[in-house]
Image (tube, rainbow, N blue to C red):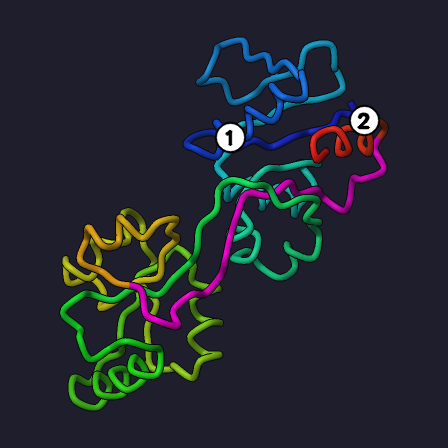
Amino acid sequence: MKNLINIGIPSKGRLRKDVLKIFIKKKLKLISERGERDLIGTIKNKSYIKILYLHAREIIERLGDGSLDIGFSGFDLLKESEINIQSKISVVKKLSFGKANLVVAIPDPWIDVQTIADLEEIAFEFRDKKKKRLRVATKYPNLTREFLFSKGVTQFKLIESLGATEAYPFTGSAELITDITSTGETLRANNLRILKDGEILKSQACIFTSKKNSNKKGFKNLIKLLSK
C-alpha cells in the first residue's frame, strides 16, 4: 500500500513503555496479534497505519532511508548517526522522558584528572611513555571523536563497546569511557566519575519524521495528534 504510514516504536525497555503511554493517552488502540513479542502491530480502526517495533538505533536508520515515516527514538541516536542520515530526518517534538546525558567518565583512582585539559596531558604522557594511545570505550564513536577533537584531545583510540561500557576500564579493555547516563548512579557504582566539563550531549526521547514521506495522506493529522 503506497499510502501506508509506518511508525517505529522502540521494541524494549523504558522508552517503549513511555511511548506506548502516548498512544493510550491519544486513544489509539495498538493491536498486536502475538502480544508483547510481536514486531509488527496495527491501530484499531486505522488500517492505513502500520506499527514496527524496532531497536531505537534502527528507527533512526530507517527514518533516514524512508522505510519509516514516523519514529520515536533518542536525540543522542540521531546525533550519533551519519550526517547524510540526519539531513533526511526532522525533529517534530522533544518529549518529556528518556532524558539522559552523554558524558566522559574516568576511573575514580585517576585523582589528577578532573577536566578534559587534564585528560589531554595524560594522553600525551601515554603516547610518550607507554608508546600507546589512550583507549576510550564507547557506543557513540562519532559524537565522542567530535567532542574530544573539539577540546583539543587528539591522542586517543576508540574501542567499540559491545556490552556494559562501564566495565571496560576494569577489564583492561580501555582507560576511560563515554556513556549515556540519566542519574550517574551506574557510573558511580562502577567506580567511575564524570569529568567536570565532560558533558558531550543532552538527550531525550523525540518524535521524528522522515522528510521524504511527509506528504502521505493522513500524515499531517497523525503527527498533530501524536505531538499535541
Count of marks, rendered view: 2
- Callout in the foreground (1, 2): 1
Mark 2 packing: few (<14 Cα in 10 Å), some, or many (20+)?
few
Magenta segment: 194-216
Magenta stretch encompasses residue 163? no
Amino acid type of the residue that numbered disc 1 sits on in the rendered structure: Asp
Q: Quadrant of the C terminus?
A: top right
- Residue sitting at the far bottom: 128
Residue drawn at (28%, 76%) of the image: 114
Amino acid type of the residue that numbered disc 2 sits on in the rendered structure: Asn
Residue 183 rendering spot, x and y as whole percentages:
35, 49
Q: Label 2 belongs to which residue? A: 3
Residue drawn at (76%, 28%) of the image: 222
193 vs 80, nearest the viewer? 193
Taking 33 as reference, is 15 above or below it? below
Mark 1 packing: few (<14 Cα in 10 Å), some, or many (20+)?
some
Numbered circle sitting on residue 18? 1
